[in-house]
Image (tube, coloured by chain):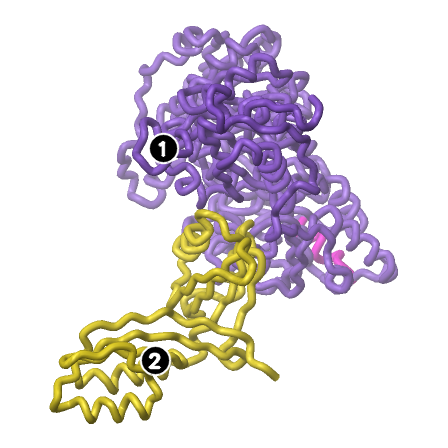
Chain colours: A yellow, B purple
């Protein structure tokens, strides 16, 4: 799977009921696959930001952007190719951490610069934020310990600085 | 009414529609929309009470097609709204400006599965250009203004406004609002900026490509009509002397009687229209969208052609076929720009030599005209003959609406469309039953024009009840019912592609009795079975103007529409009329 396959589209939409449904409905009826999606308010309460990662092999990116542009409530669209963007995703993960493996696990956590959010005698809950591919790798590292629960946000992105 | 006067949301809705210049509403009342029907009594707007909400929607479309003004339909919540989904989808695919008002259950009841509640904005999201759920009475004038603005600008389309009952019901405190006349300055549409002007540099490039092309074709779609660009198109075509094909949605955008017009392209297009596109080195697509019914199998479509694509909707550019020059803009403005650019480049004298192309195309026209075999004595009427007689028995500005199927193709092929806005049909969605309500809408908008609906018996049975509307509302349309007792187009496919295994296409010869049915609906009715009766019956129908007329022509079910590009084939594999098939040798 090439890294260039996933592009990030950052849209500013009017903060109105049903806007997410319009956007999601457009993707499904045009056959575009959404890899991930993140919705959040902006600093102006009239607008929200929806950030998608789309698989550009599922549909021409140009059509995705043009069709999004036709939605009346979509105010602005920025398309970020992987090379032009800084993107991050957040993961919360609860891992088994019995006494026998705890030391080894804490070393990994330190190496990866993850944060311990909570902790009891059996389990540790971590937060980890990085590029999506790094999240995948981190997850693989933790898998041998036993993953109890995992939750990822989908990526958000900003244009890179020159 | 002066601004700041306190009125109810229902009154504000009707005032807002008046303010938008609405003169006719096609509608059907019901519980949730009831409070709006009270101020309708005192309004200057004519309300036409339909017999089914689908009829209201198609009438609004027919009105819009004929007049160029947005059609307006108004229905209640729940089933009223779901019944109008088909016309919305139809208007969406054919870019018809339309505003649909739907009643909704009171705002506080939304989401409770209340009586006649459905998620109208959710259901219609995919088949409207935009829709609104109004939550406050105070927003009504602004949102109605926005709805008309969106429906009529950019690429036109249907807009739905869903209105909860409490904000229009004068007995509810939530309906109180201070009236204001909404203007463009009130609109809150930060994400809507249609672009009409084409890019000048791209227009210049297009003009250069036109200048240099040796085998160009003007491929003209419904966008020409939406942009009121028929005159500009004619000026361009005559200036550059390039042949024109008019798609199903563009019949009438360029006169059929004009020597440059090759007729309709596509699945049932004229041989010369289909083949000239196929062999062309430059397709100048104006307001067309490379629909699958035009291109046939895409891989093999116009393989040597460069593409100039002009469309108001940028999403159409490069959607199906990549354009060498794609210009976003209003067709009229861009065509005028191309004309100017051509002049700046040195006018028509510097154009490539196209004498070979011209003689090739006219050779095809002579060799492969549309044709059919007249009926032998004792045989049933040929549908093409009926259309020819209708064409010859009516003035050229007659408005013709058709349903969907063989009769639609025969009408598009055999009528001579010499004026824009005289042809109304369901091209994109292919909605059976479209013609009668669409013809009623057209006649309501253009009462002084003669309006014929050409319908098939399958279509007629879907929406015939609107002839009651036409009788009662005194909208005297005329219906030519081509009755072959079959779902003819499906029958044709089963004959050609399913080894003549006819499955569920026979509709019965004696039931219904269309004459009794038409008369029961208040229409005059005439049945025609012999060729010599056709013209007199049309003449008689044209003399009746105090009620609708239905002329039933009993036609030959064995007749098929030719030419035809079989589904999945390329346009080079066009099947012509059996009598011309031997002429194809050496052509393809």
Q: Within the magenta stretch, is there residue B242?
A: no
Q: Identify the residue under disc 1.
A: B109
For image coordinates 73% across by 63% down, the residue present is B202
CB within 8 Å, label 2 to label 1: no
Q: In which quarter of the image is the N terminus of chain B?
A: top right
Vertical comparison of B373 with B460: above or below: below
User: Which SS type dominates the magenta stretch?
Assistant: helix
Question: Callout 1: helix, strand or loop?
Answer: helix
Q: B100 or A121, which lies in front?
A: A121
Q: Identify the residue under disc 2.
A: A128
Q: Residue B268 carries which label?
A: none
Residue B376: x %, y % from top left: 45, 23
For image coordinates 56% across by 17% down, the residue present is B40
Q: Can residue B152 be seen in this view?
A: yes
Q: B488 or B147, which lies in front?
A: B147
- Left or right: residue B164 versus residue B269 is left
Q: Can residue B586 be seen in this view?
A: no
Residue B544: x %, y % from top left: 59, 7
Residue segment shown in magenta? B352-361
């Amino acid at each position: 799977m090439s890294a260039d396959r996933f592009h990030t589209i950052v849209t500013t939409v009017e903060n109105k009921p049903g806007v997410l449904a319009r956007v999601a409905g457009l993707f499904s009826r045009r056959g575009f696959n959404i890899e991930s999606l993140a919705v959040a308010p902006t600093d102006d309460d009239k607008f929200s930001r929806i950030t998608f990662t789309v698989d550009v092999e599922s549909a021409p990116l140009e059509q995705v952007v043009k069709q999004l542009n036709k939605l009346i409530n979509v105010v602005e669209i920025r398309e970020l190719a992987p090379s032009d963007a800084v993107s991050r995703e957040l993961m919360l993960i609860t891992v088994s951490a019995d006494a026998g493996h705890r030391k080894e696990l804490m070393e990994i956590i330190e190496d990866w610069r993850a944060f311990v959010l909570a902790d009891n005698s059996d389990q540790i809950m971590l937060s980890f934020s990085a590029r999506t591919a790094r999240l995948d790798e981190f997850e693989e590292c933790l898998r041998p310990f036993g993953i109890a629960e995992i939750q990822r946000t989908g990526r958000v992105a900003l244009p890179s600085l020159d | 009414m002066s601004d700041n006067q306190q009125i109810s949301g229902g009154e504000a809705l009707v005032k807002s529609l008046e303010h938008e210049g609405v003169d006719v509403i096609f509608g059907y009342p019901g519980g949730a929309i009831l409070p709006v029907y009270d101020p309708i009594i005192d309004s200057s707007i004519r309300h036409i009470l339909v017999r089914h909400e689908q009829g209201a929607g198609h009438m609004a479309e027919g009105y819009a097609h004929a007049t160029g003004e947005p059609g307006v339909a108004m229905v209640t919540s729940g089933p009223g709204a779901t019944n109008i989904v088909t016309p919305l989808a139809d208007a969406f695919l054919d870019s018809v400006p339309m505003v649909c008002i739907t009643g909704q259950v009171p705002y506080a009841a939304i989401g409770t599965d209340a009586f006649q509640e459905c998620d109208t904005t959710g259901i219609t999201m995919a088949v409207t250009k935009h829709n609104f759920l109004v939550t406050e009475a105070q927003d009504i004038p602004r949102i109605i203004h926005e709805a008309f603005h969106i429906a009529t600008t950019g690429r036109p389309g249907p807009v739905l406004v869903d209105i909860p009952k409490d904000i229009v019901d004068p007995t509810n405190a939530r309906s109180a609002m201070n009236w204001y006349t909404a203007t463009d300055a009130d609109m809150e549409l930060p994400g809507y900026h249609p672009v009409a002007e084409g890019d000048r540099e791209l227009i210049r490039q297009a003009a250069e490509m036109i200048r240099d092309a040796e085998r160009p074709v003007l491929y003209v779609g419904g966008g020409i009509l939406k942009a009121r660009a028929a005159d500009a198109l004619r000026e361009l075509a005559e200036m550059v002397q390039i042949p024109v094909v008019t798609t199903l949605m563009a019949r009438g955008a360029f006169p059929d009687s004009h020597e440059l017009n090759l007729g309709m392209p596509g699945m049932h297009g004229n041989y010369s229209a289909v083949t000239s596109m196929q062999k062309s080195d430059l397709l100048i697509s104006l307001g067309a969208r490379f629909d699958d019914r035009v291109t046939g199998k895409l891989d093999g479509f116009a393989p040597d052609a460069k593409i100039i694509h002009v469309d108001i909707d940028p999403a159409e550019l490069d959607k199906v076929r990549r354009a060498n020059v794609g210009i976003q803009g209003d067709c009229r403005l861009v065509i005028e720009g191309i004309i100017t650019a051509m002049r700046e480049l040195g006018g028509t004298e510097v154009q490539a030599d196209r004498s070979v192309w011209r003689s090739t195309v006219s050779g095809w026209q002579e060799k492969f005209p549309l044709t059919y075999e007249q009926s032998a004595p004792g045989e049933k009427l040929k549908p093409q003959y009926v259309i020819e007689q209708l064409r010859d028995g009516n003035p050229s500005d007659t408005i013709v609406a058709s349903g969907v199927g063989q009769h639609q193709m025969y009408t598009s092929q055999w009528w001579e469309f010499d004026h824009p806005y005289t042809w109304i049909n369901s091209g994109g969605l292919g909605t059976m039953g479209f013609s009668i309500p669409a013809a009623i809408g057209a006649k309501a908008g253009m009462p002084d024009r003669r309006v014929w609906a050409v319908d098939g018996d399958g279509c007629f049975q879907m929406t015939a009840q609107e002839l009651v509307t036409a009788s009662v509302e005194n909208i005297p349309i005329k219906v030519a019912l081509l009755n072959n007792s079959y779902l003819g187009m499906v029958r044709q496919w089963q004959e050609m592609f399913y080894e003549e295994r006819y499955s569920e296409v026979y509709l019965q010869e004696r039931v219904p009795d269309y004459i009794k049915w038409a008369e029961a609906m208040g229409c005059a009715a005439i049945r025609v079975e012999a060729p010599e009766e056709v013209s007199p019956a049309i003449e008689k129908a044209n003399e009746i103007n105090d009620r609708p007329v239905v002329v039933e022509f009993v036609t030959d079910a064995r007749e098929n529409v030719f030419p035809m590009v079989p589904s999945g084939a390329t346009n080079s594999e066009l099947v012509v009329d059996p009598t011309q098939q031997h002429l194809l040798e050496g052509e393809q």
